[in-house]
Image: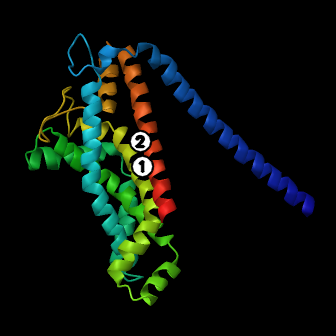
Amino acid sequence: MTGRKNASERFMASITWAAAGITLCALLFLVGFILVKGIPHLKPSLFSLTYNSENVSLMPALISTVIMTLMALIIAVPLGVFSAIYLTEYARRGNKAVGLVRVTTETLSGIPSIVYGLFGLLFFVTALGWCFSMLAGAFTLSIMILPLIIRSSEEALKAVPDTYREGAFGLGAGKLRTVFRIVLPSAMPGILAGIILAVGRIVGETAALIYTAGTVAQIPVSPMQSARTLSVHMYALSREGLHMDEGYATAVVLLLVVVLINAVSARIAKRIGGKA
């Protein structure tokens, strides 16, 4: 029996290492391909503030990406975190409405982004009359990332030991003070991890934004103006087929933006976790 157990353990370990190796190789291949194809075509003209037919600058798309990300997070993060606080700290256990919310949240997480784009087109762009605008795109993205933020925040709040709550109650703290002074700071690293994943989805989103924010290559001066993000910019260049080199260069910048955002967010989460 011992020999069979050791053999099965070695077999499962080999499968695990093989899967990890294949995943790592695929990641390295994709990153290497993007860098090899894009880095030679990075040039100062790509970072010009003006986009025209002669210079397909990515700077307007980069600025629009930052603005779009901030707008979507401002809408989605408070709603997601406060919803998770209610579901975890205030809702009664076994409540059917809470169970329905959780099932709905998990269902929304698996809906393709093109469906969110069509919903945004029909509701925000057409029904509300916002036309193709940054605001329509931000609201569409906020609905898309809301389930992710709710679920990650809920799991982070559940991971906080009940002894923290009991200790606060024993010292005379109320429910609200306990949640916002004790529980929420302790769960903040997990909440930030969900926000990091949401940012990655926002930055890499294309389908939902084509139908809501549009593809105008200009720096927006109003939330009601149309604009394109880096992912939409890269898609537009590849679809035209005339500026593939600039498209690869845009992919490099997009990759660097995602890595930078993840690094900064991880550092913030580590500091908050250390203070908590």
Task: Tell me the residue at 27%/49% (across/down).
Answer: 72
Helix, strand or loop status at disc 2: helix
Q: Nearer the viewer, residue 232 or 109?
A: 232
Question: Please, is residue 108 above or below residue 260 in the view?
Answer: below
Coordinates of residue 207 in the picture (x, y in percent): 30, 37
* Residue toward you, 192 or 245: 192
Image quarter of residue 75: bottom left
- For the N terminus, give its image quadrant: bottom right
Q: Real-space Cα distance between discs 2 and 1?
A: 8 Å
Return the residue nearer the eye: 95 or 42. Answer: 42
Which element is circle 1 on? helix
Q: Given the image, on which type of amino acid does mark 2 rest?
A: Ile
In the rendered image, is residue 121 in sight? Answer: no
Image location of residue 174, percent across then percent down: 35, 85
Disc sitting over residue 257 in the figure: none
At 32% from the left and 57% from the top, the residue drawn is 146
The single residue placed furthest to the top in the displayed view is: 54
Q: Do callouts 2 and 1 mark residues in contact (Cβ within 8 Å)?
A: yes
Label 1 Cα crowd, 10 Å radius (few <14 / some 14-19 / many 20+): many
Mark identifier at residue 261: 2
Instruction: Judge from the rendering whether residue 21 lies leftward or rightward of residue 167; answer left or right.
Output: right
From where the camera sits, is residue 137 visible? yes
User: In the displayed structure, would residue 105 be above or below residue 265?
Assistant: below
Classify residue 193 as left or right of residue 238: right
Kindly identify the amino acid type of the residue bearing the numbered disc 1. Answer: Ile
Q: Quadrant of residue 22?
A: top right
Residue 196 circle label: 1
| Residue 215 image point, x, y percent | 21, 29
